[in-house]
Image (cartoon, helix red, strand yellow):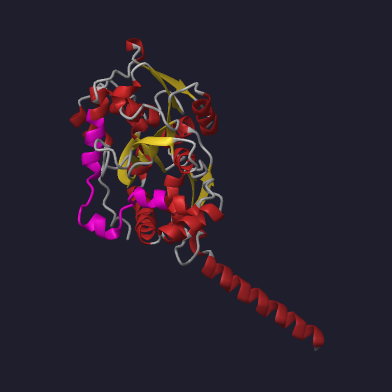
Amino acid sequence: MKVKKIHAAVLTAAFAFTIAAGLLFCGGKPADGKFKFGKIDIPGKDGALCNAPLYIAYEKGFLAEEGFDVNLISADIETKKIGLNNGAIPIVNGDFQFFPSIEQGVNVKVVDGLHNGCIKFVVRPGSDIRAALDLKGKKVGVDEIGGTPHQVASVWLEQAGVSALPEKGQVTFLPFSDGNLELQALYNGDIDVAAMWDPLGSIAAKAGKAEIIFDLSTDPAFAGKYCCFLYASNKVLKANPQKVAAILRAYNKAQDWISKNAREAVDIITDKKYAAIEDKELAEELVKSYAYPSAHNRESNHQDVGGDVLYFARALHDIGYLTTDPQAFTEKAYQKIDLTQGQ
């Protein structure tokens, strides 16, 4: 009798497990549809503070809510391009550094705006350099030739009548793969200006080691415009547009949440070591300056993604970084996504 009772208990437990497993993994995915789109890789380990919407979409569960089991990966710019081209990476955040790549055939499209400016130009305290015209004959540090700080500096210089072309010899650009080395070169006098991603330039300025002469978020030529966009793989867009729409909904939820909870966003980002910045007050100030769009701003068409793509396409065309007519380039490079797809 005791054996029968044990046997019955085992059968009951096994049956209960079978039912639970069937409910949880119906059709190879959770029955609640949590991972409708399965596992995806998204580059999210670059340490950039301005990539906050991805970190928050991941940590607050917005991506999971939209059906994604996300794996955050490390990827340099070339790895991102390859992944987007073959569809292994569905989406990345990036700036107009991608524009020449699109012109050269990388199969991606701008599908949304991410945030406003996140680049500063800093000089040594007491420097007489205060404007673009002051950079004639000077040396400017950047992360890479052709990278966004270099392109931003080039636009800034050219609009002031200073040539950024190396053959003209008016300004010399020097690349530094490490931002800390770039700052050290500034302190040592090896360069006159450091064009940098946040937060290093801002940290140096707050510590009194440098002075900011250019802020992408407030400069008249760039203020109020998206500098960073979301780029989707054309291959994924064609094969599964609902997947891209779902990713964008998750990003939009995160942007809206950050716009209302900047300090809590900073706590998550710093505590989880997504970005290396210990000064939370400065981090909060920077996050607010990026003007992540709220749901209200989107509903009122506060920013025009396509218009900003066209603006920067014209700016890059004017200085020779793009050869395609800006309007034709924008029509090729930007695609407005219907976010109701798949809902």
Left or right for 322, reference 56: left
Quadrant of residue 315 in the image? top left
Q: Is residue 42 magenta?
A: no
Q: Could you tell me what secondary structure mostly forms the magenta stretch?
A: helix
Residue interval drawn in magenta: 285-314
Locate the C terminus by quadrant.
bottom left
Q: Is residue 104 visible?
A: yes
Locate the N terminus by quadrant.
bottom right
Q: Residue furthest right?
A: 2
Q: Observer-nearest residue: 50 or 83?
A: 50
Image height of 137 relative to 28, above or below: above
Image height of 234 relative to 274, above or below: above
Q: Is residue 286 magenta?
A: yes
Q: Residue 238, image x and y in percent?
A: 33, 42
Q: Residue at x 32, y 23 (%)?
A: 134
Total count of labels:
0
Q: Residue 252, image x and y in percent?
A: 34, 55
Q: Residue furthest front?
A: 126
Q: Residue 64, image x and y in percent?
A: 46, 59
Left or right for 206, reference 257: right
Q: Residue at x 43, y 53 (%)?
A: 284
Quadrant of residue 169 in the image? top left
Q: Residue 17, image x and y in percent?
A: 62, 72
Q: Residue furthest bottom?
A: 1
Q: Residue at x 63, y 75 (%)?
A: 15
Q: Observer-nearest residue: 333 or 229?
A: 229
Q: Observer-nearest residue: 194 or 83?
A: 194
Q: Is residue 68 visible?
A: no
